[in-house]
Image: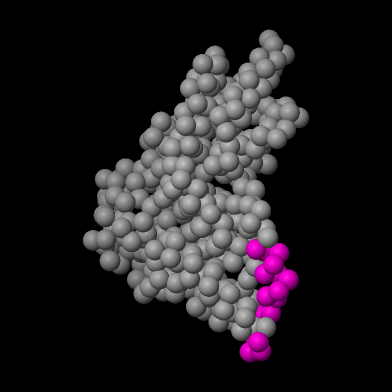
Amino acid sequence: MIYFDNSATTKPYKEVLETYSKVSEVYFGNPSSLHTLGKEAEMLLDQGRDQIAKLLKVNKKEIIFTSGGTEGNNLAIKGTALEHKNRGKHLITTSVEHASNYEAFAQLEKFGFEVTFLNVNESGEISISELKDALRDDTILVSMIHVNNELGSIQPIKEVGELLKDYPKVYFHVDHVQGMTKVPISFKDCYIDLCTISGHKFHGPKGTGVLYVRQGVKLFSLLTGGVQENNLRAGTENIPGNVAMAKALRLSMGKFVDNKNHLNELRNRLVNSLREIDGIVVNSPDNGAPHIVNFSLPGIKPEVVIQALGERKIYVSTKSACSSKLNEPSRILMVTGLGQERAESAIRASFAFENTKEEVDEFVNALKIIFLQLKEVMR
């Protein structure tokens, strides 16, 4: 099996699953309970929170456990807008956001907020000058994805943070789901107020995530009914999932330190091979993330290619997993100006540190055969 769909989800590490299983069996108490089992569970949850905080170099009080990227993004965006609406109702984001961000802003527009969607260039990147021009006296939030989940474009987060530090009434939220453990950023150095990560994107269990909330930032809670997670997320905590996510983050960050150039080598190998195939167009920018390669086969339905590759036990995807079943062109590729034909025929390959050069070569060889066969059929 060749698994090149790591931007959709990653395979949990064996050690992570072992941790999840052990904690589920031994530390099954409710951390809000006053008895010994509850206290043991609470202590373990606190240890997991502390470990994640140290890895991210933040205060453990700034770590809010969530169910993943979608919840974290919604809490950051809607929580900021609803908490601070009396100060202003203008929000800024980009036109290439993940659906969990994009649709959250669309919903807030129905609630009377005004949203500016920043344009991007062909590489999928915003302009700092356009962002500066968009800021107003009533702006309360700037939110943007760090690494685009389809193209791999990287937004200038540090430059945005440097700009916004002079606007103390504007909160800065970063969707770091795709960048975590592969394109690292410093929350402090980038002046980030809110940051979303998701456990299953770095070999942790699904249903786990973190929203970093800088101390002093107030949010409107979307889930009520308890005082868990600093009163921001009511509900019994997912002890095994959160502890296992902490282990996955530690292991994945260690792999990045030990294999910094590996993903770049895989990416360059695939991009160079694809550019040698007549009729295939690479969409990802050259300065994009090292683990995502987006390319198009104009005139060919990508679903057919994906199924044919799947029969060979090679797994890739079309666009974001959240919208891959929608029969329409990629919104991300359309707004970058790549055109409908490329947007309708796009395929995404995404790597993990466990992938190899041999897998890249096998993938390219299979793709060549399938592509040539489909072109013959269409003649």
Q: Say whether residue 301 is visible.
A: no
**Residue placed farthest to the right in the image?**
311
Magenta stretch in the rendered image: 19-36
Q: Quadrant of the N terminus?
A: top right
Q: Is residue 377 above or below residue 86?
A: above
Q: Is residue 48 visible?
A: yes
In this picture, residue 160 sits left or right of residue 105: left
Pick whichever, 170 or 46, lies toward us.
Answer: 46
Residue 230 location (% of width, % of height): 50, 78
Q: Quadrant of residue 285?
A: top left
Q: Is residue 28 above or below residue 173?
A: below
Please tell me which residue lies in front, 87 or 317.
317
Q: In which image quadrant can residue 27 be found?
A: bottom right
Quarter of the picture holding the C terminus: top right
Figure disc tally:
0
Q: Residue furthest left?
A: 166
x, y percent for residue 359: 61, 30
Q: Is residue 110 magenta?
A: no
- At a point 58% along the width and 75% down the height, the residue shown is 44
Residue at the spot 63% in from the left edge and 26% down from the top edge? 363
Query: Is residue 227 rendered to the left or right of residue 121?
Result: right
Please give the name of the residue rendered at 49% of the width and 37% of the height, measured from the top-left corner: 263
Residue 376 image position (x, y, % from top left): 69, 11
Which residue is rendered at x = 68% and y = 60% of the image?
A: 18
- The front one of 63 and 119 is 63
Find residue 7 and report its horizontal and vertical position in percent: 57, 44
Residue 31 in the magenta stretch? The answer is yes
Q: Can you name the residue that lies furthest to the bottom here?
A: 34
